[in-house]
Image (cartoon, helix red, strand yellow):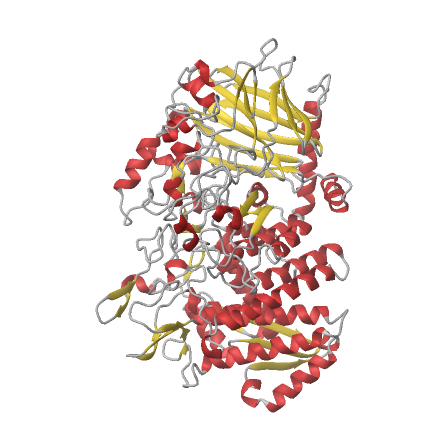
Amino acid sequence: MTPEHQRLQEDRAGDKSWRKFGPYVAERQWGTVREDYSANGDAWNFTTHDQARSRAYRWGEEALAGFCDDQQLLCFGLGLWNGQDPILKERLFGLSGTEGNHGEDVKEVYYYLDATPTHSYQRMLYKYPQHAFPYEWLVKENARRDRMKPEFELMETAIFHENRYFDVFVEFAKADSEDILIQLTIVNRGPDDTTLHLLPQLWFRNTWAWGNNDYRPALSATGEGHIRAEHQDLGLLTLYCDEALPGTKPSLLFCENATNNSRLYDAPSDEQFFKDGINDYLVQGQAGTVNPAQTGTKAAAHYELAIGPGATRVVRLRLAAPGLATPFADFDPTLKLRQVEADQFYHVLQAGLTDPDARNVQRQAFAGMLWCKQFYYYDVPQWLAGDPALPAPPPERLGGRNGTGWHHLNNAHIISMPDTWEYPWYAAWDLAFHCLPLARLDPEFAKEQLLLLCRDWYMHPNGQLPAYEWKLSDVNPPVHAYATWRVFKMDQKARGDAGDIAYLETIFHRLLLNFTWWVNRKDRDGRNIFEGGFLGLDNIGVFDRSAPLPFGGYLEQADGTAWVAMYALNMMRIALELCKTNPVYQDLASKFFEHFLYIAEAMTNVANEHMDLWDDEDEFYYDALNTPDRGHELLKVRSMVGLIPLFAVEVIDEDTLANAPQFLARMNWFLSNRPKLAALVSRWQEPGKGARHLLSLLRGHRVKRLLARMLDEAEFLSPYGIRSLSRYHLAHPFVFRGTETKFTVNYEPAESQTDVFGGNSNWRGPVWLPMNFLLIESLQRFHHYYGDDFKVEYPTGSGQLHTLLEVADALTQRLTQLFLRDPETGRRACFGDDKQLQNDPNFRDHLWFHEYFHGDNGHGLGASHQTGWTGLIAKLLQPRSGE
């Protein structure tokens, strides 16, 4: 047991709150739904990047390299100024959803390099240009480009050429649970002497300006040149500020975390020193914007650092209890110890992973997962009603976004976010995928996350899980049960015992409510054909599947139905596990077994009209359109929709059945008395191992035919995984002709060129990690049943036959090649053609984990730091061990 494992154990036991402080501050709060009090729900324009430095937020904070307590009462973040920029660099810059030619996008270069699950050690890197940051250029050039052109990125501005930038390394190390060492290491990569203004900042989240609680905490300067913080819930803390050089203490600047009404609204204010006071003092030279009494609710230690070419400067700070006589005496050895302990933790975690490059990629993926843990606060009834001290929100809000049906929702927890700038809010199905790599790091946290969304203050009373703040009532694919089972098995293996049955049982009961919601709300007329809407797949369809069809009728979704079939099998498998300690769950296992069979039958007999969602001619699954004028019609788009039926697969072996005799009896009766349904279940006898049953939407022949398309390099198989749309549609676009409108689906391997769903959404060709991950695991389960005698051609047309396990391993290798250096060229596919990213030693080993990847060349696209579900690469890099 490493020291980090011991800290996790102490935290779980309640002996010490090692996770109380962490990187829980988002990198963007502006432009979120929570801060939007407009009448029309225009969140991006109600709070903007330009307003952010002057507006006190209601629901959360944002920072560069932020660190805070688990209620986000006291926050630490970084401020930088190169003497050229028009504003302090206190937050990351990016384009709003309406400014980008492919939606919102952060336009900065930063990396999460290391982290441990208790946040005993954290390290990140921000690259700060020495020239003026090209804010206006980024906005104008992206506005000039249409959807047919790629996004214009910061690297394309040549701002980093000649290495005229600072590398700003930020490290946090905990000497104790509430004793945090902070080291800022600044490297001048450029050729000239230059000056950097470094402003580590401390502030309190504004909890006093809204009329609910008028208690105001306080920051003040100490006689020793440090910053004292006093809060009724946190007690007393001090930010100790070390000298930049012997004899040089930083100057301390104070203001209030309060809105500058004069700047934003040309209105008076009771405050005198505003949130933007430090910015205005330093950048604009306005001496009256900081408090000469050196008190307030926001403060900065101002270091003015002259740094020669290639030189490094180090600044040390410590957030700890007051009264430390020599706060930096043990700083260096403690920081070094935490670095060593982080290495020890990952040495254990990465056992069996020997390639240094793979270890580096995996460790940064894990780091991104941990840096994306955020404090998320959203009380919907309070948000709708407004606050006593402010004008009432427009009445239109009550009929707008989240205005109906979610008055129970009150969230104030540390939650794993997709990323901290582009998606600084949880999404139900993203979170389920996050929990798989998180379970490798901190199984208890992963289990807490899955349970959290099922709690009464998250889950709707009708059983629906909240999707995300932009539309809580939207429908995500039901993968919560899948993640619950996978996390349980991973934790069970790590524990070496029967596993956390209490966790499994608790969440199973909540998932029963959610499954019932799916059956009652998404199965039109009780036909076992499900219509989930867009289901997170955005632009993949012919129409916007979240909206009514433009000509009436409805869709019968192959993917929606397959997701629920998968859900039924996941629930059956959980129930069979719970049978081991409580036989009563056998009845529920039977219920889900039978429900799966009815869904499987429905996919072959839609609406009792003997219409199959499987097309025998194309040997592929399609959505069906049902309209009064045209009847049932398959929409022959070869997309991920047709591969999702592979996910619904489970193998029941003799050992499992031995623990559930009532379930076995019911299953045998059902198979004997429902011969049509029995034909959907494969069974074979293995000498010495007894009976094994395969539950799947596909029998062996269809598995082979569907895989023939999926593994065809002219269709779905790219050099870097499975595309979300077949490349066949590059030369053969799908065209649907309505009475007045033509709808077309083309293969689009990179950024979206269509806006059926809007934003930066694109499922028309790129490679997505979560879907590939599910495909790999499905192939592994099929192999568990069929064994080594069942082989398919891989790639299609190659004449080379492989087992399904070998195919799963080959797909895993293709996905890992997105990030790993090519052994011959040294290139990383995810970096594309950017020579500085590919070759510069100060860039080439730092990774971004993009939202999705170019369907032909693997270039990273979309949100650049979505380590959330792309963090699954950490799981794929680990040698397979049968979890």
Q: Nearer the viewer, residue 305 or 326?
A: 326
Is residue 875 shown left or right of residue 46? right
Whether 777 is drawn above or below 50: the answer is below
Task: Where is residue 747? Give x, y as percent.
Answer: 33, 60
Is residue 162 shown left or right of residue 842? left
Q: Residue at x 47, y 66 (%)?
A: 794
Task: Where is residue 354? Give x, y as percent.
Answer: 62, 46
Whether 638 is drawn above or below 414: the answer is below
Task: Where is residue 516? Give x, y as percent.
Answer: 57, 70
Is residue 733 shown left or right of residue 726? left
Quadrant position of the N terminus in the picture: top right
Quadrant position of the C terminus in the picture: bottom right
Whether 486 is drawn above or below 380: the answer is below
Q: Residue at x 35, y 66 (%)?
A: 548
Q: Nearer the viewer, residue 616 or 826?
A: 616
Q: Nearer the viewer, residue 216 or 475?
A: 216
Q: Nearer the viewer, residue 177 or 815?
A: 177
